[in-house]
Image: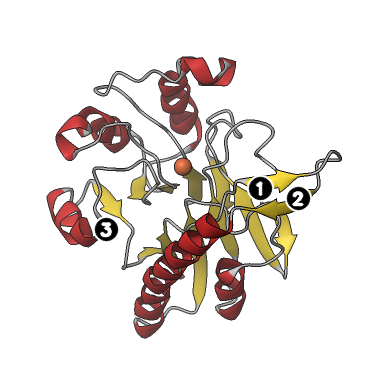
Amino acid sequence: MALYALGDLHLSFQAGKPMDAFGKVWKHHEAKIEKYVNQVVKPEDTLVLTGDHSWGRKLSECREDLNFIEKLPGKKILLRGNHDMFWDAKKTTRLNEEFEGKLFFLQNNFAVYKDYALVGTKGYTFEGPFYLNRRGNVVGWDEEREKQAEKLVSREMTRLRESFHLAEKAGYKKFIMFLHYPPTNIIEETSPFTEIAREYGVTAVVYSHCHGEQRFGDSIRGNFHGIRYMLVSGDYLNFHPALVLS
Ligand SMILES: [Fe+2]
């Protein structure tokens, strides 16, 4: 039994938005997802997909994409990404009712893997614009956007706290935390997300959203404060699911 994660599938079976324009790694990426996930994930395993599942703007435009995910092996747990327009956070219960036994939508709730609670939310991080000097060092940023970002971070933190709270109330003491956005931006060393990970002593923080080689290093990878930080963007992993726990 193992726990895997992979993010940013950006499927487009209905929405007609092929990803080929974003580079070689995205060519026939859905075929790679199907192949690589089937190579490692067993029916008894759990696979967390960390958001940006589909380009469809509403559920009816995502059916084939979700159907593709359903057919992948293992227990599938989905997190909200910034492009998942079909998923209104307030309607998560409705989605979980409709897809019961097929897909689990992780939002203001938690899932279980062995004695771990899997908690998560989309997250948010201020992505600029940052102003750089000639050496490429950050010398300023858009303060209005930063203020807006603070509001979004705070809303996401409330949602994440609820997940932790519910899991704790149910008796769980070990946690894996999932985010769609990276936990910190390019100028932060810590953030409310790294702080809550520390507060609950999570084993790992798993996130995606960063695409392209220049962005892969935007946030924390590896060990920080005794917690393992894992970037699982599809293109970063060439669509091989990452092993979180075995
Ligand atoms: Fe994203």
Residue 85 percent location from the top left of the image: 28, 43
* Residue at far right of view: 135
What color scheme is it?
A: secondary structure
**Could you give the CA–CA distance between mark 1 and mark 3, rounded to whole angstroms?**
29 Å
**Amino acid residing under circle 1:** Phe
Find disc 2 in the rendering and name its residue: 138
Are circles 2 and 1 on residues that touch, CB within 8 Å? yes
Label 3 lies in ligand 1 vicinity (Cβ under 8 Å) = no
**200 above or below 241?**
below
- Mark 2 packing: few (<14 Cα in 10 Å), some, or many (20+)? few
Q: Earlier in the sequence, mark 2 or mark 1?
A: 1
Residue 175 percent location from the top left of the image: 50, 70
**Amino acid residing under circle 3:** Ala
Label 1 lies in ligand 1 vicinity (Cβ under 8 Å) = no
**229 above or below 242?**
below
Q: Can you tell which of label 2 and label 3 is closer to the viewer?
A: 2
Q: Nearer the viewer, residue 74 or 106?
A: 106
Q: Which mark is residue 81?
A: none
**51 above or below 118?**
above
Find disc 1 in the rendering and name its residue: 130
- Mark 3 packing: few (<14 Cα in 10 Å), some, or many (20+)? some
Find disc 3 in the rendering and name its residue: 89
- Mark 1 packing: few (<14 Cα in 10 Å), some, or many (20+)? some
Q: Earlier in the sequence, mark 1 or mark 3?
A: 3
**Could you give the CA–CA distance between mark 2 and mark 3, rounded to whole angstroms?**
34 Å
**Amino acid residing under circle 2:** Val
Q: Quadrant of residue 223?
A: bottom right
SS at mark 3? helix
